[in-house]
Amino acid sequence: MGAAAQQARPRLDVTLPPPAALTREGPSVRAAGVVADTAMLVLVRNGFPMELHYRVELWAARRLFDDLLAATEWDVVVRYDALNERYRVFRVDSTNVVHQLGVFSRVSDVAAEVERPVRVALAASQRGGRQYYRVVLNVETLSDNDLDEVERWLRGELRPAVRGQRNPGTAIGRGVRRVFVRVLGGEQRHLEQRTPSFRVPS
Amino acid sequence: MRSGLTLRLALCLATLSPVVGAQQPDSLRLSHVQARAIPREVIEELARVYNASGTLRVSGSYDIERGRVVDSDVAVLDGPLTIGGHVRGRVVAINSSVFLEPDARVDRDILVVGGRLERREGATVHGDVRVYAASVAYQREGTVLVVRETEEADNADVRWWRSRERWSARGWTDLRLLSARTYNRVEGLPVLVGPSIGRDLGWGRLRLDALGIVRTVGNLDRAEHTFGHNVKMEFELGDESGLRFGGKLFDMIDPVEDWQLSDGEVGLSTFFLHRDYRDYFGRHGAAVYAGLYLTQASDFIVSFSDQRWASRDTRDPFTLFRNSDGWRPNPVMDDGSLHVLSGTFRFDTRNDADDPWSGWFITANLEQGHGTLTTIAPASFFTRNVAPGATDYRRGFIDMRRYNRLSPDGQLNMRVVLGGWLGGDPLPLQRRLSVGGPGSMPGYDFRREPEGRDVLTCSSIDPTLPGGTVTAVSGLPAQCDRIAMAQIEFRGDLRLDPFGIFDDDWRPWRHGYGNGAQWVVFADAGRGWLVTPRADVSDLTYSKDKFPKARTFRTDIGLGLVLDNVGFYVAKALSGKDAPLNFFVRLKPRI
């Protein structure tokens, strides 16, 4: 594998804080090589927003079954403003507050912003015993969930709109876009990483 | 570090913050954390500095390289601004972040609004630092920049994000075109088309969908086979928790059992392999319903409907392979008119619906049907002894799944499914159940022609009995009054990313993506049975209070390898020594 390929390889880096800070700080999470994904960039340039959905979970290792102690989620969105030829990057936290991260003209700046490490406010539990973090990143250019939701609703079955806080939008437009997305191979990427198990120093 | 320096760092970070701990300037300290509001004097200061004649104004990404000296104030709009050199004046960033390189030096204040400040070790700031995460709105009036506090409607990103939410506006109207259910041998691809309207009425939200259904393999001579409809009106009260009630008119084709395989798997199997793993019947009528939902974890819906049931013939939709082969006939179902009262409960505490590691997922349904069956579909001997006329039945179904993490690399999942007749008259054919096949017990073939009595579908061929038949019912429908099935599986991570390795050679952009690889070991046990007063007639029939003994259950075991999201499995039936290995593919987790 060449150096360039190694560099471009998408990956999740998860770094634990120093042992003394485990109960004060969460892990550092960094998605590397995601913006360099050519197919994704093509889609973004053509008007499909790139959504990076992060989910970080704190687990406690138990004798039989592990416990999920806590979790947090957030999104980072990259949109291309064709009128101004700029990339707009913003983050949506778990309380649905939107934080602007910047407006960029160069892809390298977008990559630097998106792939900047973030410290997750999910510190280890003092009484959690042996613990570990699981980090999941889903990258997608279009959410199929919207359509799934419409279909559930139409069927009139379970939870027809419980999660229905989203506007399904115009299905024709979404349908056509989804076909394009799939033809281009964009749709969705999935990255997952786990930290080694650790104990909180007493 | 200047003693007595007052530094203000306003951060609006609810759950996470940029990793600046290691990069935090030693000359900076937090004095208070401010949420979203930006003081008026700060907004005025932004405009004042930006519009000053001596200010270096830039828009978009901008670098002040190492070694460069800027004598004036610097104002950046929609940056980011990266400073490696020396700025003798103030630095103002509007909707922009500021990055200080190791040799950066700023002699006066830094004010960042709508962004953040990051400083590498070695950078120095000799003035105050203020950072506000919230952005501001601005517009140009001639050569002057006018800045004001952002309201949601001003911010393009906020506006765009909110527009994804259904009720971001007081109303919306869409034209929809989407598939209903999935590709199947009765409809081909059913397509829904029509308007959808939503209105916020203040006291609640109203939604109306008026969708027509067009089936790609319908029969134009019989319009009811080609066209259908699904019109639905719903009121919703509440947000995270609340009530909803509504009504609908429908003329649709529904599957008899949809609990085994997902819509996507059934559709792909039909389209590619010419194999449809479901049976179907027509439902035409109207329903009213009311539901209570409590957060995203649970909800409960009660519905009452008046519906007409009718059999549907097998069509011949196009398939990619084996297109000239025949289809398994869609079994004839009971025809009739019924009032159906149904209650459905859902409880979902899974940490991740797509890749659950822990939690419960429970769905339960109780149904009471009352009405008249005008045509009774053929069934196997012993299945039921009914004639056209009034019927009144009660049926229940519960699917319980539990996901457990044993270690970071291992997982134990369990599932129990129970369902069937609870009381009243015998169940209509479309409300009966079965097990067997890739969606439930893969060691056993799906709807295999029975030899004698089949405890998976409750079909029977026994010419030795009075009234016994020599051939199975066409299409091999599910005929059990009750079923019980338990599944258990262990999943272990292989720490491999085979699709990534493959893609590295052929499609480098995909390298590293995917769910990786897992190995799976599983075991299933289940069976179906009939409930009759004549419980001693055969090993297929039990009285209503009896549960079959464990030794009568069919069992299978299997192994699997899941690559990315595609699982390749092999299963072996334990109850039949000569049963061959069954190979199957799943696109979703088995449990």
Image (tube, rainbow, N blue to C red):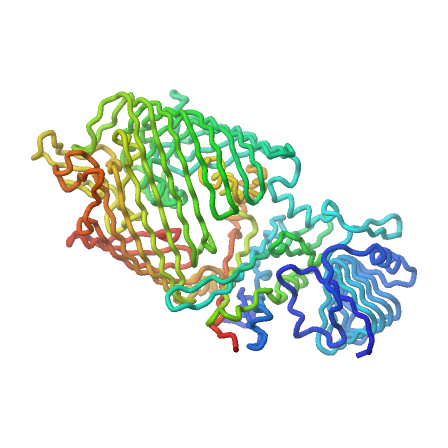
Task: In the rendered view, tell whether residue B573 sits above or below residue A63.
Answer: above
Q: Is residue B431 above or below residue B153?
A: above
Locate residue B122: give its quadrant.
bottom right
* Residue B79 position by quadrant: bottom right
The single residue placed furthest to the left in the displayed view is B464
Residue B547 image offset from top left, x and y in percent: 22, 44
Evaluate whether residue A176 shows in this view: no
Position of residue B387 measured from the top left corner of the image (x, y, whole percent)? 22, 23
Q: Seen in the image, is A159 located left or right of residue B90?
A: left
Residue B253 in percent (x, y) is at 39, 31
Residue in front for this viewpoint, B72 or A82: B72
Residue that extends furthest to the right in the rendered view of this protein: B53
Image coordinates of residue B184 in percent, x first then y, are 37, 37
The answer to whether residue B440 is left or right of residue B155 is left
Image quadrant occupied by the N terminus of chain B:
bottom right
Q: Relative to the observer, which residue lies in front, B431 or B60?
A: B431
**How many numbered marks are there?**
0
Q: Residue at x 24, y 36 (%)?
A: B479
> What residue is shown at x 63% (from left), y 52% (from top)?
A96
Q: Would residue B447 be seen by someone viewing this image from the given angle?
A: yes
User: B67 or A161, which lies in front?
Assistant: A161
Q: Would you say B103 lies left or right of A152 here? A: right
